[in-house]
Image (cartoon, grey):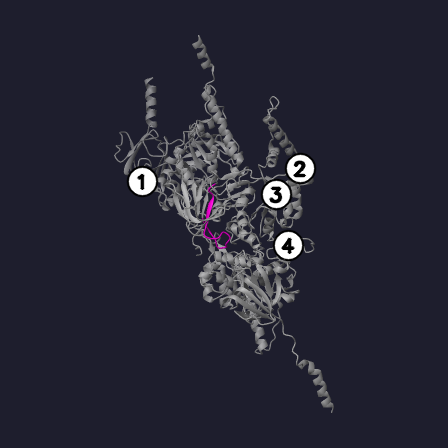
Amino acid sequence: MRVIAALVLSAALAAPLFSQDKPAPPRLIAIRAGKIFTAAEKTYDNGVILVQGGKIQGVGNLEIPEGAEVLDFPTAWATPGLVDLHCHIAGAGLRDINDMVHPANPELSTRATIDVESDLLKDALAGGVTTVLYIPGSGTNISGFGTLMHTGGGRTIEDLIIRYPGAMKVAQAWNPERQGGDLGMSRMGMWWGLRKVLEEARVYDEGWTAFEKGASKEQPKKREDLELMRGLFQKKWPVIIHTADARDVMATVRIFNDEFKIPCIVSHGEFGGYKSAPEIARRNLPANIGPRTYDWTIMVQDGRCYGIAAKYYEAGVRKLSINTDSPVVPEEELIVQAAMCVRLGLPEEVALRAVTIEPARAVMIDHRLGSLETGKDADVVIWTGNPLDVRNRVLLSMIGGKVAYDERKGKRVNFGGGW
Amino acid sequence: MIVGLLLALVLLQDPPKPAASEAPAAKPEKKPVYTALVGGDVHTVTQGVMKGGSVLLKDDKIFRIGQNLDLPEGTIRIDVTGKRVLPGLIAVSAHGLGLSNAPGKIADALDPFSESIQLALAGGITSAFVEPGGGPGGIFGGGAGASAPGAMIKMSAGTLEGMLLAEPASVSLGAWMVGSPSERYDLKDSLLKARAHLEKERDFEKRRAENKLKAGETVPRAAGALETHVRLLKGELVARMSAPHIDDLRRALDLVNEFKFKVVLTDVIEGWIIPEEIGRARAYCVVEPRAKEHAPRNSSGRAGSSIEQAAILRKTGVKFALLPPNATVGTGGVAGRDLMTLPLDGAFAIRGGLDEQTALEAITITAAEICGVETRIGSLEEGKDADVIVLDGDPFDYRTFVELTFVNGRLLYEKSKSPYFSHLKGRK
Amino acid sequence: MTALALWFALLAVQDDELVALTNLRILTVTRGEIEQGTIVIQGGKFLAAGADVKTPPGCRIVDGKGLVAFPGMVHPHSRLGIFEVSSTGGSTPLHLAYDELNPSLDVFSQSLRSGFTTFGVLPTGGGIAGQGVILKPAGGSRDELVLEKAGFLRIVLQPGSAGKEAIRQALEAARKAIEAEKKTPAAKPDEKTLPLARFLRGELPGIVETAGPSELLHFWQVMEGFTEFKPRVSYAGSPDAYKAASELGARKARVILRPLLSLAPFTRERINPGAELAKVGVEVAFAPFGDGPEAYQGCLFRVSELVKFGLSRETALRALTIVPAEMMGVEKRVGSIEAGKDADLLLFSGDPLSPQSRLRDVYINGKQVFHGE
């Protein structure tokens, strides 16, 4: 009898859990645009993007379901939110990005320095940039770990973070050279130091992996500074390397890809770095070009102005992305960087992919964003026309299905400001 | 006897003064050189676009503009079918362009062989307002502030002839904006004296016209700084004042409204907030569309920069010229932020709502007005200087390149022959 | 009386030493190259030079052993023997390099092995810096060294308004003095104005130094006010002078260069400034980089490098000899192997432009002053 009562009681209590009334489904939003550049297989004219629960439910020449909230932009372009892998502006300023006492600082991180209220992030968002890899500077060979984050759509640092760590930041040369008389003034010293840290981290990861898998009974000592580097060897996140001329680009490729087999992104690659582009292409590595968009008189000496991105592309590099190295170029001008690469010889479509899917892929987040495809995050930007034409501007930026910037709601005060 | 007297008279006369320089032997009449740009879309700026038109240059001037022109024998004929013909672009401020570091007048520091001139020509720039001091920077450009009034110069590579357009091309009234109270007092005092002098001059002219001059009276003369201010009040010179924010603008406009001179307000950030006040003073502005200044977070009114500034000024009838973030030329590596792509900043102004015609004027004829040389350059009109550029597309398209640049009728830049960009194919 | 006359005659014979150097390859510079010939020197001058020259009676014969004869080289832009560094600028036309010379310095004897036998030495200063001295380094006293005490005017155009104005004013004063003299022949230009008046009238050659090709344009702008005069001017200064090649060619100018290759802007493409200028009819002289054994001895080597990169052999050889002599107005005395000129002679073991050649002998005024191994 008591058992039956208990059963009935638990059934009664459990009833709301299994109520026949399902909770109301999240709102369905339909964005109609004159042209949809998906950064995937197809581009759609007069297409529709269906958004629900923060994700893309469909893209194409679709019927709009009844009850959907329609955002109608019949003459506009829709693109994925832009992605910049080389951003220094999400903190409180340039002082936040370099700590240069030691030549290698894998223990440092940008995460806690994020300034959610930053005007610069707002500008970026209103310029169509929805995702940035906020990294430390290039003052040391390993300056720390960067944070992959949205530029808006949240109130706290945690709200904005897409993934931490985003990537480890390394500077190969052309800035991290030590001037204080300690080891690391020359490439010999810098790269000896780099290799040492990488080798230590590799051994550390091996030891812990063995222990975690039960192959070894000895628990290794925990090291805060090397802990996140394990993710490199486990290929969970990449290392992004500030590198420059052809010799430095080769060193990057050799050390990170060939020797230590870590996912890496070759960043900057200017001052004649394109001469090593065939080696990058051969290994199918990602290259991240900017802020300089041309090589002309520094390390290149035939009097010609060469478009750097075009040169990498010509050499066969396909995982090509473009950056601003903000604040060197303001973050909201990421699309202008792409336009300049086109001006200097890069095909248009390659340039648009270079600020959407390719950087997402390089930073290993392409399963979530970088293109307008079913299942991915609804990070969508609406432009008055082809984004590469500087005369066009952003009308709306959406992050995770929520409108984070809408020009119609405020005045266009700054370039990329509407607050 | 009379002969003797006459002889004496002849002999007593001073021998004829030798000419200060012997009259140079009359130069043999040089045949004029004609160049014709045929069959392009001619953007005159002031008189619309002529499709399939031709521009005929005679020596250093624009001779004829029209369709199906009769070309004189020996004309150098350049086919510009499918291209656009525009006046040479004008930079209302340029650091270290075409100048050496030589002290003194800009006329004596001109450097026609400077590489900076070659770069400017490749960007379609044919004239620039330059100030001494400050050189071209690296990626960021910029230089030290100006130390003396500026001059208007042409990018006439290889020769001093025709390079100096006007010096001084402005009167700097910086003391009014950033000077100490006593410096401001002195400046105002000088302007008052200049005004009084001008009245004396006018009174003199009036009485001269009415033949009421006193014996031996001559026109009153002014010298030094006073003369400069008199010329300013007469409208012969333009003043430049840096006025970024509302307070600065109002301070500048106070002086303008009191003395009524032609003024160019430079570095204007918050002009979009009080455009009517600027309009009433008939002041010109120099606007950098991409200048960015955030409004202070606790500000109640409107503040900071706006990309819509150019469009707002236009609506109120205020005239302005445009500048890029770096008013210089260079090869530092970041494309699109300096004078080598000046039209790109026109495109940004258009992004902010400005119409294309005004954007074009802002880098041509209005820029010329701001520098006081609008009778010579800034538009394609018969009789104006032959400063002409040919583009391979819409001037405000980010992919457009300059193909030809003429200064004073000389072809100084050809994209196809220069190593700079000849390997970059234009788009179809 | 007769004995005295005899004694003088004997002395004269000794001074009038007659030497014939036979079996030489002779590069005369102005009268072609002679494969095998003889040079006769008398009284410190060239008496004859050629393939069919007969050696006069009583002549001391020296077998040239197949050496290559070349005129003693002329350096038009030197500071040999001067160590003052202060520069006052302005207008100091009366300053004489002659006064600054220190003839006791070893540099003179050291320079004898350099192959340069005539030097135009600049006075210290800027603006209208003063007058240079032309000298040969053989001799003990100042007057033994000197060919011309005040041989040319040095003008350094200091960039900017003040520099141009200083020159303009100095020339204007000279012009007024010339006009005054025309009116009243007794009214001679004063001491300070005289050198400039002589310059304007073409009597005193001028060497004008500019920082770059644009400054050349500025100098010519100043000279536009003085077109009634035709001064003799040579230009010295920057390796970029080739950028003004067409203007220099149109004026048939004379230019002093350092023996350097330049690079086309933004590239590593070599430009041969001397060749570029020679192409358009400019007369080029090469002056060593500085003063001192390394500078002097390296000069030939560098000039031969320029020949490798497109400079004509004739231009190169003239640039070290007759052209600098003309610049300084001493071409009647030095700069080539011609009868009547000073016997300043170099004997090389091979062609002077070949890096393997060694300088064996140097003669100044007919006397051997250096004998190398």
**Parent chain of label 2:** B
- Image quadrant occupied by the N terminus of chain A: bottom right
**Parent chain of label 1:** C
Which residue is the extreme one toward the top? Answer: B1
Local packing at callout 2 (Cα closer than 10 Å; few below 14, some 14-19, many 20+) is some
Lower sequence index among marks 2 and 4: 2
Picture disc at residue B282: 3
> What residue is shown with label 4?
B294
For the residue pair A211 and B381, the one nearer the viewer reads as B381
Give, as a single range, the part of the protein colored magenta.
B385-403
**Parent chain of label 4:** B
Identified by mark 3, the residue type is Arg
How far is mark 4 from mark 3, CA to CA?
27 Å
> What residue is shown with label 1?
C67
Identified by mark 1, the residue type is Leu
Q: Is residue A146 above or below residue B220?
A: below
> What residue is shown with label 2?
B188
Local packing at callout 4 (Cα closer than 10 Å; few below 14, some 14-19, many 20+) is some
Q: In this view, does B75 lie above or below C195?
A: below
Q: Main secondary structure of the magenta part?
A: loop
SS at circle 3: loop
